[in-house]
Image (cartoon, rainbow, N blue to C red):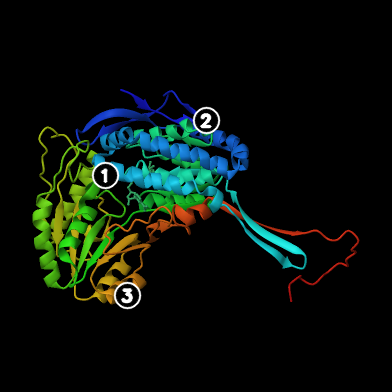
């Protein structure tokens, strides 16, 4: 069986350490293994990034951007190969995998604007005969730690922009689906990236803890679950690093009595069950304002959930593949059992699904709970599976209060035809990304992505303008060239323009 290893200083490393199996979730069988980097291997990657830094950060941004232009073309040319690897190891459908790759490519496109993005600010005559300007410098060696659910897109949120800004990078992808991430990184080398500017180490906690401990790693971008995000933020900032750590979610969609229900149901189907619910922006709670809309929503949802086309993630034309691992399947099934025990009404039960020819795959069908209440675990915790909970409230104000009380605040949306309700909702809701009749309000590459509350630890969101700020340090230079013959007395009062 092949072993996925590491890309360090421009070379693929031979395997010589601990390994873990990587599964095809549609068959339940291991397809390859991944090496789990030791502390020494990660330290080598950090050293390679550190050695590549001086030349890379001093390269004109336009030359760095030219490499990213070639990278974008290579990503497009290799789409089929990348999509096949994502589907094989993650389980999402090829159409869904192509969607994440294309969103990732949009982040590469944004990063090619580095010469424009890094232009500074200049003030002539900031004081008497004094000019002042600010410009943006690389932070240094940056580490990225990414989750399993977007093996192409989330790494592409990070390193294209980080290296465009002059940093060098060590990426630690998810050990559950590492192959597409490594292939994509190797395409960047093929595009002409100098050795050491981007390094990829596969691994687990040992690799992550080595990145956290290293004084040479100056900043960390993390995306994953909230407990690990909080750990990375705490340990990273304690050691003086700049950290942005994006965590988990419980995204609510509000259905107002005047919603265009047929379109809203279509939107909800994709947002709740697409990618088997394994998206941090998936809608997992439908908050219905009034029993009438709740009953109507459920009666339209039930036949559509029962008709979901579930099958091998490598096949085209399906709605949903399997969950990523056996352990995750057991976790999601456990939540469904828990919801039943807690008294929620399981209107559609996807637990007993079996896919002919793929009996060992990690499959679960779409599940729908009605009459979910806020003290239930299925409401409070992130399930990360195809499980939608309906909560009934009496007014928009109650819906807003409910959402604002939840510990997570990643994304949310409202379905309505009323501008006043939409405006009140978008003003008052405590979440970082809000959709109005848009179920998955994932910001485009030239905005920035991030949640509020326990969905993000740190100050700056990912990619876009906040990404540029995260991956750069501002330096402000104040300059004066006194006339040769002037003799000035010492000034002891603090200088000002007054
Ligand atoms: P995870 O937290 O288990 O893993 C994320 C990364 O952290 C992986 O690279 C993993 O190897 C590493 N890791 C895991 N346990 C660790 C430990 N104890 N110490 C150090 N490192 C550790 O997350 P996942 O299961 O891969 O991904 C799903 C989660 O990611 C969900 O909670 C989802 O909401 C979240 N997510 C959030 C966003 C966002 O933008 N907010 C985007 C995608 C996914």
Q: Secondary structure at mark 2?
A: loop
The span from disc 2 to disc 1 (Cα, nearest Å) is: 32 Å
Mark 1 or mark 2, which is nearer the start of the sequence? Answer: 2
Tally the marks. 3
> Position of 183 compared to 322: left or right?
right
Residue 96 numbered tag: 1
**Looking at the picture, does residue 487 appear above or below residue 398?**
above
The span from disc 2 to disc 3 (Cα, nearest Å) is: 52 Å
Q: Residue at x 15, y 62 (%)?
A: 262
**Looking at the picture, does residue 198 appear above or below residue 138?**
above
Q: Is residue 168 visible?
A: no
Residue 424 numbered tag: 3
**Looking at the picture, does residue 57 appear above or below residue 434?**
above
Mark 3 or mark 2, which is nearer the start of the sequence? Answer: 2
- Pointer 2: what residue? 9
Q: Secondary structure at mark 3?
A: helix
């Amino acid at each position: 069986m092949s072993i996925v290893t590491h890309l360090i200083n421009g070379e693929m490393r031979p395997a010589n350490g601990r390994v873990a199996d990587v599964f095809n979730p549609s068959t339940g069988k291991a397809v390859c293994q991944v090496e789990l980097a030791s502390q020494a291997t990660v330290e080598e990657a950090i050293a390679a990034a550190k050695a590549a830094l001086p030349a890379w950060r001093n390269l004109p941004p336009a030359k760095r951007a030219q490499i990213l232009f070639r990278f974008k073309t290579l990503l497009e040319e290799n789409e089929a190969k990348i999509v096949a690897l994502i589907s094989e190891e993650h389980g999402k459908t090829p159409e869904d995998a192509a969607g994440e790759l294309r969103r990732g490519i949009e982040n590469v496109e944004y990063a090619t604007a580095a010469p424009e993005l890094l232009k500074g600010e200049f003030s002539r005559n900031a004081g008497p005969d004094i000019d002042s300007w600010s410009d943006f410098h690389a932070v240094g060696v940056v580490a990225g730690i990414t989750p399993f659910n977007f093996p192409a897109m989330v790494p592409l949120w990070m390193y294209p922009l980080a290296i465009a800004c002059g940093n060098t990078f060590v990426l630690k992808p998810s050990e559950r689906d590492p192959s597409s991430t490594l292939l994509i990184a190797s395409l960047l080398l093929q595009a002409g990236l100098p050795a050491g500017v981007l390094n990829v180490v596969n691994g687990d906690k040992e690799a992550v803890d080595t990145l956290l401990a290293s004084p040479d790693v100056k900043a960390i971008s993390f995306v994953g679950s909230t407990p690990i995000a909080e750990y990375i933020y705490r340990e990273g900032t304690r050691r003086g690093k700049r950290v942005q750590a994006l965590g988990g979610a419980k995204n609510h969609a509000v259905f107002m009595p005047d919603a265009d229900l047929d379109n809203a149901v279509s939107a909800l189907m994709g947002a709740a069950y697409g990618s088997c619910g394994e998206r941090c922006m998936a809608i997992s709670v439908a908050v219905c304002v009034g029993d009438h809309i709740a009953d109507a929503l459920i009666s339209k949802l039930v036949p559509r959930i029962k008709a979901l086309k579930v099958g091998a993630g490598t096949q085209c034309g399906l709605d949903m593949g399997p969950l990523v691992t056996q352990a995750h399947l057991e976790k999601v099934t456990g939540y469904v059992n828990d919801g039943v025990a807690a008294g929620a009404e399981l209107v559609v039960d996807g637990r007993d699904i079996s896919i002919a020819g793929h009996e060992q795959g990690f499959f679960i069908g779409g599940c729908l709970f009605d009459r979910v209440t806020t003290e239930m675990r299925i409401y409070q915790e992130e399930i990360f599976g195809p499980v939608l909970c309906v909560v009934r409230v009496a007014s928009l104000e109650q819906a807003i209060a409910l959402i604002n009380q939840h510990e997570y605040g990643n994304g949310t949306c409202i379905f309505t035809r009323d501008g006043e309700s939409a405006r009140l909702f978008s003003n008052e809701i405590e979440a970082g990304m809000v959709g109005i009749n848009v179920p998955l309000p994932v910001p485009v590459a030239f905005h920035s992505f991030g949640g509020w509350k326990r969905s993000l630890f740190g100050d700056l969101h990912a990619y876009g303008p906040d990404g540029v700020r995260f991956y750069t340090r501002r330096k402000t230079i104040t300059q004066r060239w006194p006339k040769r013959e002037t003799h000035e007395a010492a000034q002891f009062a603090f200088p000002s323009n007054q």
